[in-house]
Amino acid sequence: MTGGNNMFTISMSCFEFDDFMKLADHVGILAKKGIGVELCADSLPFFNAGMYKSLLPGIHLGMHCPMRGIDIAAPRGSAGERFFWIKYEDTLKLCQQLQASYMVVHTLHKVHKVGKAEALELSFERLQKLIKLATDYGVEIWIENVGTYLKGTILYEEEEFIELAESLPGALFLVDVGHAYQNGWDALKVCRRLGSKLRGLHVHDNFGVTDLHLRIGSGSFPLKEFVYGIPNKDINFVMEYLPTTCDSVKAILDDIDVMNEYLKASE
């Protein structure tokens, strides 16, 4: 999906490493309903494009970026910087083979090894280069809000995240509503400010303290009001749970039905 289409997607984060077949067994209903799958680069059961095409025929695919060992603000010339580019280019190649239209990108994964000003500079440079590289592979980069104040891993504060949309050419965004809520951000304001650069949402719930990835309605995030207030609903709603909170395809499909009800009621 490249904007202009409202759709739903199930993240592979919902399933254990060896539970891929649980999702593949429902490929018929997913295809019929037009529901996509967001693969997770760190937990792919196989790094073979042909296998996914065989098991998920007719399914729109997206990709979540690699995270293990990745630090977008790794010091220049470090092994961390080299590892960043190796992992990302490998994943972009797989995206191209899969015809996955987008890859979600995190802005920081480790506590800063450099000062914040330098971390912001390094992150900006690498996002800029990554967007250009992804264009060569026919893939959109969707930048996600990540990190937590509790762990000191937030690089972009709320306003800085919004400003990134204004200062970074070609930047597109995915807002994780659970991450925003746990950090006290105004998720609706962020979505409104991002405007047409908003491509998707990671949808899950918590109680405004920690990142629990609960099913919608299981925490305290005001999802219904949030959906009503989003000005641009032609985006990708990615249901991003954990195996410990919901690994049932039927339950996820039920939650997608609830989301659809919210969307229809807000028209």
Image: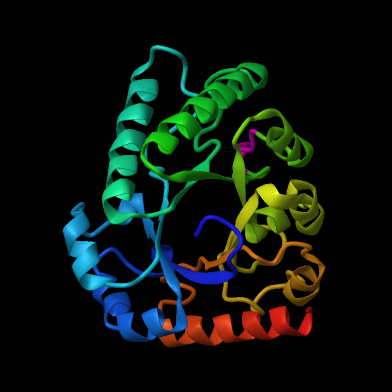
Look at 71% across and 83% down and name the residue there. Answer: 264
142 relative to 49 in the view: left or right: right
The quadrant where residue 172 appears: top right
Most common secondary structure along the magenta stretch: loop
Q: Between residues 11 and 101, which one lies in front from this camera angle? A: 101
Where residue 22 sits in the image (x, y, percent)?
Answer: 29, 78
Q: How is the image coloured?
A: rainbow
Look at 79% across and 54% down and name the residue there. Answer: 192
115 relative to 25 in the view: left or right: right
Q: Between residues 169 and 43, which one lies in front from this camera angle? A: 169
Look at 34% across and 50% down and name the residue there. Answer: 41
Image label count: 0
Please say if 207 is above or below 101.
Answer: below
The quadrant where residue 203 appears: bottom right
> Does the magenta portion include 249?
no
Look at 59% across and 22% down and name the residue there. Answer: 119
Q: Between residues 58 and 174, which one lies in front from this camera angle? A: 58
| Image quadrant in which the C terminus is located | bottom right
Where residue 254 sits in the image (x, y, percent)?
Answer: 53, 87
Whether residue 12 is visible to the viewer of this picture, yes or no, is yes
Where residue 231 sits in the image (x, y, percent)?
Answer: 79, 63
What is the magenta range?
Answer: 151-155
Where residue 8 sits in the image (x, y, percent)?
Answer: 53, 72
